[in-house]
Amino acid sequence: MEVAEGLHQRLGLDYIGVNVEELAGILEPVIEELVEARSTRPKADAIVNRLERGKQLLLKAIAANLLDREELTPEQVEFIVANAEELAGRAAPKLYRQAERHGLEHLVDALRYLWERYGNPLPVRCPRCRFSSLTPDLECIVCGARVGEEELKRSIGFKDMLLEYARTADHGILREILAAGFVVLDGELKPPSLRPASGYSIVIYLNREEREEVGKLLSEPKPPA
Ligand SMILES: [Zn+2]
């Protein structure tokens, strides 16, 4: 408790809403870990390293404690992103919503990067929040949006993507796509027959115009490869 009081003052934790009692609870496992890691009569640089490591562990433990709270203040969101990158990446959906609520636009790019690195990035980006977070059901696991097929098509430039793919694809594949009426997207476009049996894939249906454009390519002789 004494340790917690001293540290609480020194770190100025009032601004992120952590009180002395809470800090004492957070500190306990951190101190245990530091004491366990102890060797006999460490050298000065070993002590410095250990203190530095202790500080990192403590800041991460405080961030983890804050993440358990339902709502966060702007200062708490900033503290977590600044001091616990891995936790922030995994908790990006929660932190993104809190950042939006408080207008912390400057944190969103950092969160997007941390989500890619430590979170659960999916192959297709959400048209709204631009995180790699769109499920095959067209729901975003970060911002929670439900995205329409047309909105997704616009955001990925579907028509250009489709025609670019179709121009180099074999006529057999074009016929297959026209017969099925859809293509599969799992980061890249694929014909229905290459849809992964399990795991991630989004089914995108072609509208009339897209079917006509693909149909036109079929009536042209295939250009030499
Ligand atoms: Zn989103």
Image (tube, rainbow, N blue to C red):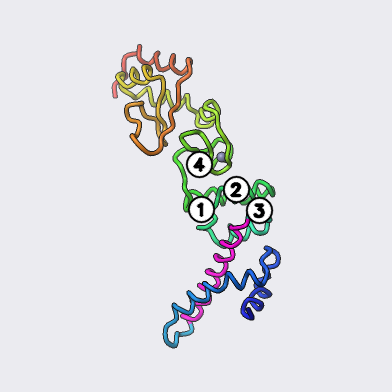
Q: Amino acid at mark 3?
A: Glu
| Pair 3/1: label in front | 3
Please give the residue where the numbered disc 2 appears in the rendered image: 96
The residue type indicated by label 1 comes to Arg
Q: Residue 179 occupies which quadrant of the picture?
A: top left
Q: Which residue is mark 1?
A: 90
- In percent of width and height, residue 96 lies at 60, 48
Q: Badges 3 and 1: C-beta atoms under 8 Å apart?
A: no
Disc 2 from disc 3: Cα separation:
12 Å
Amino acid type, callout 2: Tyr
Task: Please tell me which of labels 3 and 1 falls first in the chain.
Answer: 3
Q: Are marks 2 and 4 in contact (CB under 8 Å)?
A: no
- Disc on the earlier residue, 2 or 1: 1
Measure the alpha-carbon separation of dots 2 and 1: 11 Å
Whichever of labels 1 and 4 marks the residue nearer the N terminus, that label is: 1
Task: Describe residue 138's horizontal placement relative to residue 19 as left or right.
Answer: left
Q: Which residues are magenta?
A: 45-69
Sequence-earlier tag: 2 or 3:
3
Residue density around tag 2, few if under 14, some if 14–19, many if 20 or more, within 10 Å: many
| Amino acid type at mark 4 | Ser
Q: In the rendered structure, does residue 63 fall within the stretch colored magenta?
A: yes
Magenta-span inclusion, residue 147:
no
In the rendered view, tell whether residue 179 sits above or below residue 203: above
Q: Nearer the viewer, residue 137 or 83?
A: 137
- Cα separation between marks 1 and 4: 12 Å
Q: Earlier in the sequence, mark 2 or mark 4?
A: 2
Placement of the C terminus among the 4 image quadrants: top left
At label 3, counting other C-alpha atoms closer than 10 Å, the crowd grade (few under 14, some 14-19, many 20 or more) is some
